[in-house]
Image: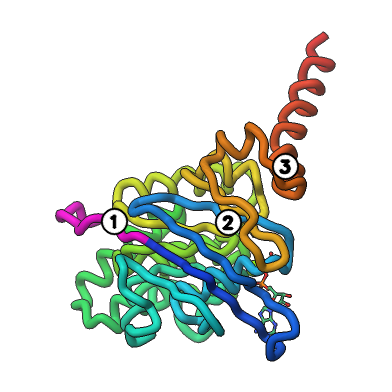
């Protein structure tokens, strides 16, 4: 990966973001304000249907909010042409979303091609990324449907990183991976984030993963943001009962595993 000097990391600011898909009867995202510091890695957690994907998509304008503002480095995203904006934001879709008619290599190179990179640079970058996500180069010529679900997810991650984005949006990037691979790839994503000076928002169902990987954890419920704090602060307790219950789950699991281990050893 290029180690050329990179600009300072981007800040991300959402103010009063709302989105309804039914003309205002219900709100998928209901007045969310969220500030993410330059270079922070934020995990976005919450129940299914709580608005995580919708909120994430307002950042790269795959969803246009009904109200509110989204800014990257102080610039309103709504005032930037969407295609241009999206080339500076890496995005890995929930459920992968690879282009089925393109090979793995072509999928990874989509944005660099749009940006007019030379073929040799795209090929070098593609080779680098496929190795980074732990796949052999023999996968590059394959079609997405010749890969397992977990392999497709890793290609999706490589594609999101291909054009050296400043902001990385990951929507359940490890959903189809087994636990060991998930942990390994999570640590790798965190290392890539640190090395490239990215600002990352990662949606995950896994609270344990969120608290172990992220600098801050944002909790959504019914379209609202209930909390946004450092993992340690959230684990120490929170006034909201939903947040408290959610944050207790990693500790409960860890305690049960420790108990089982003790019982086995004695
Ligand atoms: N394009 C759409 N049209 C209509 N309703 C939508 C659309 N996208 C999302 N919704 C609705 O908005 C709400 C929030 O959905 P969203 O996908 O943001 O949730 P989520 O937190 O990402 O859930 P999950 O964890 O299951 O992925 C849901 O009630 C969903 O049905
Ligand atoms: Mg979702």
Does residue 87 appear anywhere in the picture?
A: yes
> Is residue 133 found left or right of 128 in the rendered image?
right
Residue 139 numbered mark, or none: none
Find the distance from the CA under tag 1 to the CA under tag 3: 31 Å
Q: Which residue does the numbered mark 3 point to in the structure image?
A: 244
Residue 9 numbered mark, or none: 1
> Is residue 85 found left or right of 224 in the rendered image?
left
Q: Position of residue 172 (x, y in %)?
A: 59, 61
Does residue 141 appear anywhere in the picture?
A: no
Q: Nearer the viewer, mark 3 or mark 2?
A: 3
Q: Nearer the viewer, mark 1 or mark 3?
A: 3
Magenta residue check for 38: no
Residue at x-position 72% and y-position 68%: 49
Which quadrant is the C terminus positioned in?
top right
Residue at x-position 50% and y-position 86%: 101
* Secondary structure found at label 1: loop
Residue at x-position 21% and y-position 77%: 117
Find the distance from the CA under tag 3 to the CA under tag 2: 15 Å
Q: Position of residue 244 (x, y in %)?
A: 72, 42
Q: How many other residues sit within 10 Å of disc 2, few (<14), some (14-19) or many (≥20)?
A: many
Q: Residue furthest bottom?
A: 23
Asked if disc 3 is less than 8 Å from ligand 1, the answer is no
Number of marks in the image?
3
Judged by its main secondary structure, the magenta piece is: loop
Q: Position of residue 118 (x, y in %)?
A: 19, 77
Q: Which residue does the numbered mark 2 point to in the structure image?
A: 44
Q: Which residues are magenta?
A: 1-11
Q: Give above or below for 213 relative to 263.
A: below
Query: Which mark is first along the chain, 3 or 1?
Result: 1
Q: Position of residue 25 (x, y in %)?
A: 75, 85
Q: Nearer the viewer, residue 255 or 241?
A: 241
């Amino acid at each position: 990966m290029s180690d050329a000097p990179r600009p300072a990391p981007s800040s991300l600011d959402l103010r009063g973001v709302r989105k309804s898909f039914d003309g205002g009867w219900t709100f998928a995202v209901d007045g969310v304000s969220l500030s993410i510091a330059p270079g922070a890695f934020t995990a976005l957690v919450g129940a299914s249907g709580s608005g995580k994907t919708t909120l994430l998509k307002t950042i790269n304008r795959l969803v246009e909010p009904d109200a509110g503002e989204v800014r990257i480095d102080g610039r309103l995203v709504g005032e930037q042409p969407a295609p241009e904006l999206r080339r500076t934001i890496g995005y890995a879709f929930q459920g992968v979303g690879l282009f089925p008619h393109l090979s793995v290599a072509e999928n990874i190179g989509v944005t660099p091609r749009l940006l007019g990179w030379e073929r040799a640079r795209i090929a070098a970058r593609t080779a680098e990324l496929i190795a980074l996500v732990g796949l052999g180069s023999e996968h590059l010529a394959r079609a997405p449907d010749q890969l397992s679900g977990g392999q497709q997810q890793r290609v999706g991650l490589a594609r999101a990183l291909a054009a050296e984005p400043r902001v990385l949006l990951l929507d359940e990037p490890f959903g189809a991976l087994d636990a060991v691979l998930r942990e390994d790839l999570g640590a790798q994503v965190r290392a890539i984030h640190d090395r490239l000076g990215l600002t990352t928002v990662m949606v995950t169902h896994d609270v344990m993963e969120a608290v172990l990987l992220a600098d801050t954890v944002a909790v959504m419920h019914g379209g609202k943001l209930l909390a946004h704090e450092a993992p340690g602060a959230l684990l120490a307790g929170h006034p909201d009962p939903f947040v408290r219950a959610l944050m207790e789950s990693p500790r409960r699991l860890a305690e049960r595993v420790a108990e089982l281990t003790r019982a086995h050893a004695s």
